[in-house]
Image (spheres, rainbow, N blue to C red):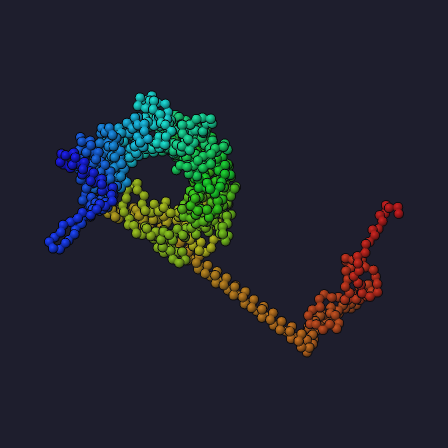
Amino acid sequence: MKIQNSELRIQICKCIIDFYHAEPPKKHIPGKVFNTVSVITCYQQASSSYKIKMAEVGGLAKTMIQSLKLLENQLVEKLWVLKALQHLSTSEVNCTLMVKAQAASGICAHLNDPDPSGQLLFRSSEILWNLLEKSSKEEVIQQLSNLKCLLALKEVFKNLFIRGVSHYDRQLRNDILVITTIISQNPGAPMIVTFIFLFLFFSLTVKSQNPLVKGLKLSNSYEDFELKKLLFNIIVILCKDLSTIQLLIDGKVILALFTYVKRPEKHKILEWSAAQYEELQLHAIATLSSVAPFLIDEYMFYNGNAQILEFLAWCDNEDSFFSHGNSFHGAGGRGNKFAQMRYSLRLLRAMVYLENDTINKDLCEKGAIQQLIGIFKNTISKYNDKEEAILLEIQSDILLILSGLCEHHIPGKEIFGTGGVDIILHVMKTDPKKLQSGLGYNVLLYSTLDSIWCCILGCYPSEDYFLEKEGIFLLLDLLALNQKKFCNLILGIMVEFCDNPKTAAHVNAWRGKKDQTAASLLIKLWRKEEKELGVKRDKYGKIVDTKKPLFTSFQEEQKIIPLPANCPTIAVMDVAENIRAKIYAVLGKLDFENLPGLSAEDFVTLCIIHRYLDFKIGEIWNEIYEEIKLEKLRPVTTDKKILESITAASENIGKMVVSLQSEMIESQARQDVQNEQKVYTKIQATHKQRELANKSWGNFLARTSNAKTLKKAKRLQEKAIESSRYGERPPNAIFHRTDIKGLNATVPSGGVVTVESTPARLVGGPLADTDIALKKLPIRGGALQKVKAVKTVDEPKKSDPT
């Protein structure tokens, strides 16, 4: 290739290209005949795969890149070399060799060289694509991130954009823009100087007097449609560089993007099809979510809040609208407006979370809070399984926006009111099983808890309404699920809610599974947290080390290191990194002395919780003392005595708690013994009663099966009856027998009394079947008998003359 012969160079390139165009093998070439022994030798053509493999092993691609530098002024030879490199770049091995030879920067820098045929640009862009796909992408981007390459890309793109008219020119223009987009991901690339024109081209959406784009208009071809989307994409990347802000302002990018945030007008002729316009609309709103936070003044100048709220109102109404939902941004929005609503809410969320007072106040004044609550309620009524995931995302974004608007803003919390509390309670009543579905219920619950914190707490009417609707019960139900990811946030809300004097009664009234109380639940969470943290406790839950009663396994492993005064120590960080401090705060506000439904084990743990603050203070003072020792400082005598007394006081508190825990455990052991004795006594009484019943049954069987035994029992019974009577009867007393004569039975005959003064003809004898209270019977001889009911005639009234 170094030989100054054009035909030779072209032939070499043709040979390399032939490696990649397999041809049928030619006929064998006959060999020679040696002496008397006829040896026939044949030459067979090497296969294309073998040639390609040898080209890779021999480093042919690297050599061709080096030879390309020799042909800067020979266009014909350069085109043949690029054609050969185009074939060679289909192999990963060759691409790696080419990148090592700086092929990316060398080829890109000459993209704009004169070439009437247009092959140079086409083949060069193809090679760059292959290098990006088949070799180290980072290294290729690094080679292209220089001013010379970017200027070449800019000029090529500008020429193709302004002068390109064919389908091929538009495709090539889009390919160049994609390569540029990939390069722009490198923060070190000098994109500002080279891509001012991009914002000028983007301003094609609005009227511009710039001579570069004046008179230009994109067609409705697919390539121009793709160009629009690529411009959206590269602007999202470039806006991350703060130095591009002024260019975005000058290009009126915000205004151009807001032209898509509009409801479709009827009877208006669009330059794009309905599906294309929908895709551009969604892409533009998504782009605004990234760009608008950097251009707050422009956003407010073009009245962005009003435009978004108006667009959301259209998304929420029942107007007939059929969306296609074909694009990436339109997923889940086929036949409805959910995709438009989702991206509009994302844009609104991005602006609200800037915590800019002007933006948030403007939204509140325009009725955003009431409108968002209404949209949330409508999404509940529109719920269906097909769009479940997108509806959950919409609801989560609404709650996050409401949290941003109401946080630190009391008027906003008052506007949130009972209607907002109702939607929060609705979410909190969600079936806990759905939290594991993976559809977004976890995110929705996080947003709900955040809304409670930002929108309800601090507004007493909302707090009272939340309590009235049993919101604390729902919070404790969620806490009882024992999901660690929610516990910290729920306990934080509980701490704040307990400042309301009405909360304690609700917390104490709550009952969980197996009649568990809130205090028992919190103490159970404490024990679980300490177990996970590796805090030392014995089998009864007592303190093991009175000097370090709260130490975790992590604190044991970490050595104390002297730190500046403004840096928190491990003991201080421990307060924020686990839920023990929040449990202590909640139980403290509920009053440690009057907690219902606690077991002995709970009381043992409660002793530690009650002294949490004392233990933590002692732990921090111990760290201070240890740091002084490590820094080899000697405190004055008074300070030393104070430090030692503080340490000793902390240890004494630990010993006192251990003593109290021991007393509780012993008392519980004694109570267990007494309860066990009571159970044994009850068991003995049951067995004795069973024995007496068995003995009575045996006596009964003996009386019924043996006449002598029956008579003997009868005599004993009569004797016992006689012995129970008075020895002397009072004078003139009438004696009534309490048994029936001639009845051979030893069981009591019941309260039977024979009244001798009543004539037998009236009662019919002692065995008569009577129903005198129910029926009026005629008097006959002998015993009374049942007869049919007789209709009685009412007596005539006194006033009746008859």
The answer to whether residue 288 shows anywhere in this view is no
Q: Give x and y (percent) for residue 14.
A: 20, 38
Viewer-nearest residue: 694 or 103:
103
Viewer-nearest residue: 675 or 140:
140
Viewer-nearest residue: 500 or 353:
353
Quadrant for residue 726, please give it.
bottom right
Exactly how many numbered labels are in the figure? 0
Residue at the extreme front of the image, as rendered: 36
For the point 17% across and 48% down, the residue is 30
Instruction: Classify 777 as above or below 396.
Output: below
Quadrant into which the N terminus falls: top left
In the picture provided, is 427 more to the left or to the right than 539?
A: right
Quadrant for residue 16, please give it.
top left
Residue at the extreme left of the image, as rendered: 35
For the point 78% across and 61% down, the residue is 786
Residue at the extreme right of the image, as rendered: 802
In the picture provided, is 703 more to the left or to the right than 618?
A: right
Instruction: Classify 677 as above or below 317.
Output: below
